[in-house]
Image (cartoon, grey):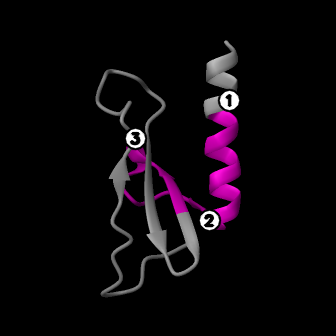
Amino acid sequence: MEERAGVNPGWRKSSYSGNGGSDCVEVGHAACAVLVRDTKDNGAGLTLQLTPAAWTRFTTRIRVNRALS
């Protein structure tokens, strides 16, 4: 998904970015979507677009799995 001129999805890095890890992502918002991209691509790579409901299911699943381990 390309960013349109004047549209800023407000990208923010994962709280785990910058700690020497190699798996860093950024999350942004667009109309009716949550956007996810690889931090290392500096905006030149692909962007995953999820519905807000799918993003909530995804992040909830991660939290549940982390609590179980």
Residue 17, x across and y down, in percent: 35, 33
Residue 60, x across and y down, in percent: 65, 41
In the shown orientation, is residue 13 left or right of residue 58? left
Pointer 3 local density, CA inside 10 Å: few below 14, some 14–19, many at least 20:
few
Q: Is residue 14 above or below residue 33?
A: above
Question: Helix, strand, or loop for circle 3?
Answer: loop
Write the residue at 69% across / 16% down: 68
Q: Amino acid at mark 1?
A: Val
The quarter of the picture where the N terminus appears is bottom right
Q: Amino acid at mark 3?
A: Ser
Pointer 1 local density, CA inside 10 Å: few below 14, some 14–19, many at least 20:
few
Q: Which mark is residue 52?
A: 2
Where does the magenta region start and end?
Answer: 35-62
- Nearest the eye: 11 or 38: 11
Which is more N-terminal, label 1 or label 2?
2
- Nearest the eye: 16 or 43: 16
Q: Which residue is mark 1?
A: 64
Q: Which residue is mark 3?
A: 14
Q: Quadrant of residue 21?
A: top left
Residue 27, x across and y down, in percent: 45, 55
Which is more N-terminal, label 3 or label 2?
3
Q: Which mark is residue 34?
A: none
Mark 1 or mark 3: which is in front?
1
Q: Amino acid at mark 2?
A: Pro
Q: Is residue 49 above or below residue 16?
A: below
The quarter of the picture where the C terminus appears is top right
Write the residue at 62% across / 65% down: 52
Which is more N-terminal, label 3 or label 1?
3
The residue sitting at the bottom extreme is 5
Q: Is residue 46 above or below residue 59?
A: below
